[in-house]
Image: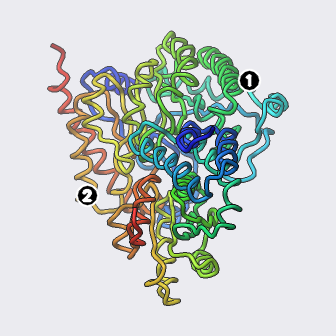
Amino acid sequence: MANFKELADSIISGKAAEAEKLTQQLLSSGKSAGDVLNQGLIPGMDEVGRRFKNNEFYVPEVLIAARAMKAGMKILKPKLAESGVKPVAKIVVGTVKGDLHDIGKNLVAMMLEGAGFEVIDLGVDVSAEKFVQAAKENKAQAIGMSALLTTTMVNMGATIEQLAKEKMNNTIKVIIGGAPVTQSYADEIGANGYAPDAASAVALLKSVLTLNN
Amino acid sequence: MTTRERFQAIMNFKPFDRLPVLEWAEWWDQTIARWHHEGLPESITDRYDICRYFGLDIYKQDWFSEQKPECPKPAFHGAGILRTEKEYDAALKYLYPSINVDPKKWTQWAIEQARGEIVIWFTVVGFFWFPRTLFGIEDHLYAFYDLPKLMQRMNSDLTEWILKVIAEVTEFCQPDFMTFAEDMSYNHGPMLSKDLFDEFLKPYYKIVIPELKKFDIIPLLDSDGDISIPAYWFEEVGIEGILPLERQAGVDMAQLRKDHPTMKFIGHYDKMVMNKGEAAIRSEFERLLPTAAKGGYIVGCDHQTPPGVSLDDYLIFSSAFREYAEKAGRLSQNELAIH
């Protein structure tokens, strides 16, 4: 019979079909959707994040692991909704206006989903107004912005200004990242946090939202 | 020393009169457009005319594309043009041109090179870059696991084509160096593991590099990002050097030199200081001077001069560059004295 460790292992090894099958088997055997998520999928992605941070995993391994997690989530999502299990929190993510680079942002989105967050991915070239509008519409607790270029990272500040203009800067937290971005830049523009890599983004978001690990 | 003699002395860790004053890559369009507004004559648009205007050394580069001009373009930045082996078969008619060298241009270049006036180099895409252009950024990374046979086939086909390019160019002259465009790192190091490098890239480098070395063409890696870890992998397959060694990505030249005493390097001048005033510009040259004086390293902007750099900034930069180039040459006479 399937167990949680096997499910976590299927995520770590990036076996999407197996993750989907094991998720289904665990649910069929009477395990709750919440337990499958918290004891199977999330520990699997936690381990992927740990290995990524330690240079044991690289981008391809993270991508296939996230794909496996999504395959499990596809089965799990309706069950989670039925049983009233809520996401850890909601975050709107995107690459800032003028910037078309999305792999870093995608990795962050995958890591956050893997940690139980609901992620609303706005894609690339996202304006300040669009970030704020999407956060409002989705009742998100946070906005995550990515930039690869020194010429586009300045648009992160525009989103923070837009939040202030709409008097939402105290209710919606902002985290940022990307190749040219630094902690001092985050401080300079008034972001709530900076993550140097995708794996660190999970801990950062939990920290700025004061969620228990 | 002639331009070419100087290059060869530096690359062979021998004393040199001065460093080349070099912008190794073509300028950004936006940078040149800005300078045209600030006093660079509008008529000066050609890469090498810009070099002459600023009194820079001239290293002439040809980038041989493995794609024919009619090859379909991706729908957006980062997208691919195919997803399956069948689509690759269909795309073959757009790939691997049979004639790559412009005989008129290369005949002229060969004359200039023989007089020592220029250094000649060429670029081809590497075995990480190439499948990425076909699959697109994200699908390429999945393909290491999803389509390994197709990846191997693509790189095998690219290998054959690069060997033909080498045969073509060497009919005209012996280029001084060449680069494999890879861009396989970001600011946290390589995009892929050593295992994937060994499986998908290494076998093809092991075929192409000996062919380059037959003609004394120095093979260099062109990769943005932090290449500190992959530097070992590339050294193992015979790559002799790396550019542009981006400071912002965390590359540390002193450490790199310590870890790779015989590798050749180009670049590493932090482009982000070029508009920070003369003191900052000089300080950056001072940082690089000790390594440059020991040979094997040509200082240059660590990618391309950004559009944030004004013409005045660049004139200060190039003037300081000339001064430090001379200084490095003087220091090299002691540092690299033949024992």
Chain letter behind tag 2 = B
* Residue B176 position in % (x across, y down): 47, 23
Q: Residue furthest top?
A: B214
Picture residue at 61% right of the left edge, 48% below the top: A69
* Residue A93 position in % (x across, y down): 56, 66
Q: Quadrant of residue B145?
A: top right
Chain letter behind tag 1 = B
**In the image, B328: left or right of A78?**
left
Question: Could you tell me the amino acid type at mark 1?
Answer: Ile
Question: Could you tell me the amino acid type at mark 2?
Answer: Ala
Graded by Cα atoms within 10 Å as few (under 14), some (14 to 19) or many (20 or more), the crowding at tag 1 reads few
Q: Residue A104, can we see it?
A: no
Residue on which disc 2 sits:
B280
Between residues B239 and A164, which one lies in front from this camera angle? A164
Residue on which disc 1 sits:
B99
Q: Earlier in the sequence, mark 2 or mark 1?
A: 1
Same chain, labels 2 and 1: yes
